[in-house]
Amino acid sequence: MQNSLKDFNHIFKLDPAKEISEEDLDKVCESGTDAIIVGGTDDVTLDGVLDLLSRIRRHSVPCILEISNLEAITPGFDHYFIPMVMNSREKKWMMDIQHQAIKQYKDIMDWDDIFVEGYCILNENAKAFTHTNSQLPEDADVTAYAYMTEHVFHLPIFYMEYSGTYGDPALVKKVKEQLDNTLLFYGGGIENNFQATEMKEHADVIIVGNSIYTDLKKALKTVKAVKV
């Protein structure tokens, strides 16, 4: 899967706590995106995850569960992403929840399908920022987190999460310069072709989420903007 991750350019992210019509979901799944992540912060329930999974499964697009709580974990996804929130003030979000998951599920975990993300939340107004008790890092902190993700933890993904706000392309460039083997994922505020292209210039993969629910037509155009 590490090799197939390197083939990814664009991923849509769907929130199981948000409504999306069948027509709009069909458009997302048939857009040509490389994969769909199912994940969110608030009100992520097993029922919501299962409902969205069953609807996405009518299509051939790969489906990934980004795990935000243990109660919403279910078989049936192609891959599983496990965040480690680097800039959280609490060890809980770096290690303790992951530790609980390993205790509970290690006998059935297939590590060919599981990928741990070094996660850095960069929007202090985001729900995920508050939920994980994160602190807003300076640029030098972010590049150091990226370096640690690759050289200390040897994780396959470093995820810059701006969560609804468009980030700083110059910082994305600086972060990318720290990484040789770890892939750089960028998510946050991408609403049009220009932003998609700008962030993809440095990030290995861009994640488009909120604009699916605010302006689907523009969101769909971000796929062709970055696909090579």
Image (cartoon, rainbow, N blue to C red):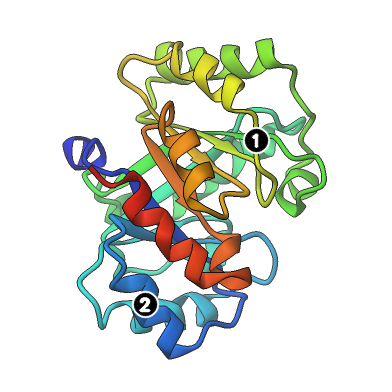
- Nearest to the observer: residue 10 or residue 226: 226
Any part of residue 168 in sight: yes
**Given contact means CB atoms under 8 Å apart, are the residues at marks 1 and 2 in contact?**
no
- Residue 9, x across and y down, in percent: 32, 43
Q: Which numbered disc, 1 or 2, marks the residue that appears first in the sequence? A: 2
Left or right of residue 136, residue 70 in this image: left
Q: Which residue is mark 1?
A: 167
Residue plotted at (24% across, 35% down): 6
Tell me the kind of residue under disc 2. Answer: Lys
- Residue 170, x across and y down, in percent: 59, 20
Residue 71: name its quadrant: bottom right
Query: Would you place residue 136 above or below residue 212 in this image?
Result: above
Point out the image quarter for the C terminus.
Answer: top left
Any part of residue 105 in sight: no
Residue 171: name its quadrant: top right
> Tag 1, which secondary structure?
loop
Residue plotted at (41% across, 11% down): 151
Query: Would you place residue 61 above or below residue 178 in this image?
Result: below
- Residue 222, x across and y down, in percent: 42, 54
How many marks are shown on the rendered structure?
A: 2
Point out the image quarter for the N terminus.
Answer: top left
Left or right of residue 86, residue 48 in this image: left
Residue plotted at (58% across, 63% down): 211
Query: Would you place residue 170 above or below residue 140 in this image?
Result: below
Q: Which residue is mark 2?
A: 27
> Tag 2, which secondary structure?
helix
Left or right of residue 119, residue 226 in this image: left
Q: CA distance from mark 1 to mark 2?
A: 26 Å
Instruction: Answer few, some or many: residues within 10 Å of disc 1's Cα (few below 14, many 20 plus, some between 14 and 19).
Output: many
- Residue 49, x across and y down, in percent: 48, 75
